[in-house]
Image: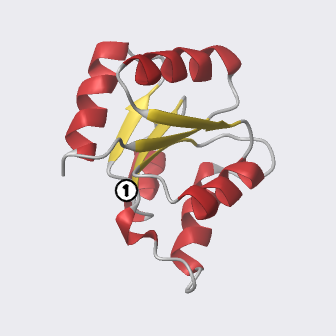
Amino acid sequence: MSQKTILIVEDEEMTARLILYRLKSLGYIVHHSKNGVEGLEKIKELKPDLVVLDIMLPGKSGFEILQELQDDESFDSTGIKVIMLSNKKRVEDVSRGFKLGAMEYVPKPFKMDEFLLRLNRVLNQ
């Protein structure tokens, strides 16, 4: 089994560092983007197995990223799994994330153990 590649698109430095550290310690190949524009570019470049995607990002929101991936006919977004990570907890936001292709929605703040359980479930689907 090859190592899984995970891209974290998160502008909150402490949250990103916490996830990066934990996932690297578990043996994942982990990349990080601090804004939506760079995040979208890295998704297309790296084609990671999983994207941990914040909604509220500088430059381009997580929702905009998902929409652009769906609209880009030259890019096959079907193989990329997405976990949304956000302070936005309204039903409309959660529903929108799922409609745009997210497989999981983790509200902040979160417990790392619960996050990892959800991450493993999504990766193994």
Label 1: how many residues lie within 10 Å, few (<14), some (14-19) or many (20+)? some
Q: Which one is nearer the viewer's eye here, 14 or 24?
A: 24
Q: Position of residue 70 (x, y in %)?
A: 51, 74
Q: Position of residue 78 (x, y in %)?
A: 38, 70
Q: Which one is nearer the viewer's eye here, 26 or 62?
A: 26
Is 106 positioned to the left or the right of 63 in the image?
A: left
Check the image and report above or below for 72 versus 37: below
For mark 1, what is the residue?
98
- Residue 106: quadrant of the picture: top left
Label 1 sits on what residue type? Phe
Residue in view at x 60 percent, y 17 percent = 17
Check the image and report above or below for 11 versus 72: above
Residue in view at x 41 percent, y 60 percent = 80
Residue in view at x 70 percent, y 59 percent = 41
Check the image and report above or below for 65 versus 39: below
Q: Position of residue 108 (x, y in %)?
A: 48, 23
